[in-house]
Amino acid sequence: MTDPREPKQAKGVFIKTYGCQMNVYDSERMRDVLRPLGYAPVESADEADLVVLNTCHIREKATEKVYSELGQLKLTKQARGGNLTIAVAGCVAQAEGAEIMRRQPAVDLVLGPQSYHKLPEMIARASRAVGDRLETEFETLEKFDALPKTREADGPTAFLSVQEGCDKFCTFCVVPYTRGAELSRPVDDITMEGRSLAAQGVREITLLGQNVNAYHGAAPALTNEADWTLGQLVRHIAKIGGIERIRYTTSHPRDMDDDLIAAHGEVPEMMPFLHLPVQSGSDNILKAMNRGHTADEYREIIRKVRDARPDIAIASDFIVGFPGESDADFEATMQLVRDVDYAIAYSFKYSARPGTPAAEMFGQMPEEVKDARLQQLQQLLREQQIAFNRSKIGQTVPVLITGKGRNPGQAHGRSPWLQAVHFELPHDQAMTIADLVGSIVDVRVIDASLNSLSGELVKVREAAL
Ligand code: SAM
Ligand code: SF4
């Protein structure tokens, strides 16, 4: 007998994700709310009945990519006589709203990051051609409450959203306008989602937020305590059976408190990796960016974190060519990079975003200057990244197996420092790679490149057997 709860007819949904990990997480949650409606994920727009573009507005190029993708989707929709639903979600949807449907009438739905729980209702309305096709309200708590508390895991690693939005208002950034005010989820809700993920075989959880270390969510109901911090939350999540690794991203230097730093040294599940964006090494530019700290204060935080966890890998984000950035300001950034010595860092040319204070500032920089600075900075960051990866050669490191590698017989996994690791399973190994996904194994690193490590299996640990 068929289960009456099972959807009758499978439809395909293709969700294309742009931008940050928040968007990756939101795409997973959209899949969750669409599943009961009979939508199963497919690999491309060609196989889909519903296409969702989950967009990013952080830089101008990202927005333009969305419009060009929508142009392609319009052609697919026309070729099918209109039988394709096109939805635009994420931060471009939030920022541009109805303008998207005006520029591209083939779009059926536009929904901001706080409205994903309304997606089923909006699809129903669109198919009946009644009601609103635009949802860009800021109701973060409603979104968190309305999304299912448990979710389907997809492999041994997962993101878990603990905080949304941002109140920092860095002068270059659209996030406070597109994602709304900062809001933290209650600890009990996060724990429920974490337990559900662990029960499905998730071993590594990355706690997510635009400003994750500003977390201050309602303490567990039974404790009667005031709001918990991220340090408290991490210690709590570490107690969930099966969760062997915890990460969090993205943090702000101003919210790096002593308890969180101590947790890096005290909680064995806490991975030795910290993504702490600094954006610039110049105090003038940091001030103009409204970052609220100096370059030396940042150096001091890194020193404390390294004291707590000496092998920690430090990652960051940089913006070059911010309005008014002089040669000396840029050199201060290069010096900070030399001083900190990063394992990995992302760097961008400043992109003026309409509505942000920096877009109106004097001293907008010419593209050639931004290009030259970006090249110089990226060269140094690449050298540091390669050196960091090479420093692992000869070490035996614990690797969480996430799947098959590129070549037959090769497994793919993650080191504690978030490096991709490839290694061969010995031919006499009784287990297949599929059996080992989700296990942590010891791998001796024999080579390293810019983006990955390669090694040989030393030992499958007890827990994996
Ligand atoms: N909340 C994080 C923080 O405080 O650093 C970063 C969030 S933002 C989504 C990710 C990165 O995009 C930023 O760290 C910054 O380097 C980059 N970014 C944001 N706005 C930008 C802009 N207008 N131009 C260039 N890069 C930008
Ligand atoms: Fe944007 Fe600054 Fe908030 Fe990060 S802290 S999301 S860069 S406003």
Image: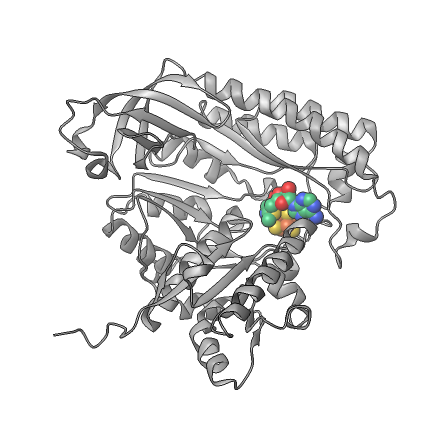
Kindly identify the residue that appears in the image at 34 percent across and 67 percent down.
Answer: 35
Picture layout, residue 226 above or below residue 454: below
Q: Position of residue 384 (x, y in %)?
A: 57, 21
The relative height of residue 85 versus residue 189 in the rendered view (above or below) is: below
Please state which of residues 113 and 102 is positioned toward the viewer in this rendering. 102
Q: Position of residue 328 (x, y in %)?
A: 81, 27
Q: Quadrant of ligand 1?
A: top right
Q: From this viewpoint, which residue is outermost toward the front? A: 79
The quadrant the N terminus occupies is bottom left
Q: Residue at x 54, y 43 (%)?
A: 251
Q: Residue furthest right?
A: 362
Residue 288, compared with residue 382, is above or below; it is: below
Residue 181 visible in the snapshot: no
Image quarter of the C terminus: top left
* 16 displayed left or right of 72: left
Q: Where is residue 450 shown, x and y percent of the image? A: 51, 24
Q: Quadrant of residue 243?
A: top left
Colouring: one colour
The total number of labels drawn is 0
Residue ID at (31%, 46%): 155
Say which of 9 and 169 sits in front. 9
Q: Looking at the picture, how far across and down is residue 327, in whole percent?
A: 82, 28
